[in-house]
């Protein structure tokens, strides 16, 4: 139904371990921009670890970060996208900017 992600510049991203255990899969038909999005999965468990769709940046799953202080500070959601499709029983994230669709970068 939804995912909690954050974007990070590749210059600030460090793989500590497990990079050799990732499998890549590219897709373009489900991405709003129509551009190629490459998904990186754990080959062992199948978990989607991150995505790359913009050169020089990656979209990581917040659940891949094990520092809970970051979850409450720097990784706290600042925006919600596709809110037009939100189910009625799910409330908006307090203080997060709301977008009806994907906010595309120019």
Image (spheres, rainbow, N blue to C red):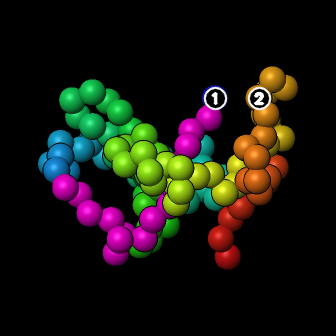
Q: Can residue 102 be seen in this view?
A: no
Residue 38 drawn above or below residue 54: above
Instruction: Please name the residue shown 53% across and 56% down the image.
Output: 73
Residue 7 is covered by the magenta coloring: yes
Residue 53 drawn above or below residue 51: below
Comparing 93 with 83, the one in front is 93
**Location of residue 101 in the rendering, given as x and y in whole percent from the top left corner:** 76, 51
User: In the drawing, does residue 45 fall left or right of residue 29?
Assistant: left
Q: Which mark is residue 1?
A: 1
User: In the drawing, does residue 44 fall left or right of residue 8?
Assistant: left
Q: Is residue 67 visible?
A: yes
Instruction: Please name the residue shown 42% across and 70% down the image.
Output: 9
**Location of residue 20 in the rendering, given as x and y in whole percent from the top left corner:** 15, 48
**Location of residue 19 in the rendering, given as x and y in whole percent from the top left corner:** 20, 51
What's the distance in space between the residues labelled 2 and 1, CA to CA?
Answer: 11 Å
Instruction: Please name the residue shown 78% across and 40% down the image.
Output: 92
Which one is in front in this view, the residue at disc 2 or the one at disc 1?
A: 2
- Please, what secondary structure does the residue beneath circle 2 have? loop
Comparing 85 with 94, the one in front is 94
**Location of residue 21 in the rendering, given as x and y in whole percent from the top left corner:** 17, 42
Comparing 75 with 87, the one in front is 75
The quarter of the image holding the C terminus is bottom right
Residue 14 drawn above or below residue 80: below
The answer to whether mark 2 and mark 1 are in CB contact below 8 A is: yes
Mark nearer the N terminus (2 vs 1): 1
Instruction: Please name the residue shown 71% across and 49% down the image.
Output: 80
Segment colored magenta: 2-16
Q: Which mark is residue 90?
A: 2
């Amino acid at each position: 139904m939804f995912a909690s992600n954050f974007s990070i510049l590749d210059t600030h991203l460090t793989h500590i371990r497990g990079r050799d255990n990732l499998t890549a899969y590219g897709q373009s038909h489900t991405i709003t921009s129509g551009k190629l999005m490459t998904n990186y999965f754990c080959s062992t468990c199948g978990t989607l670890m991150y995505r790359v769709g913009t050169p020089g940046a990656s979209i990581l799953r917040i659940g891949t970060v094990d520092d809970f202080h970051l979850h409450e500070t720097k990784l706290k959601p600042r925006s919600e996208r596709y809110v037009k499709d939100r189910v009625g029983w799910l409330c908006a994230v307090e203080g997060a900017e709301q977008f009806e669709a994907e906010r595309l970068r120019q």
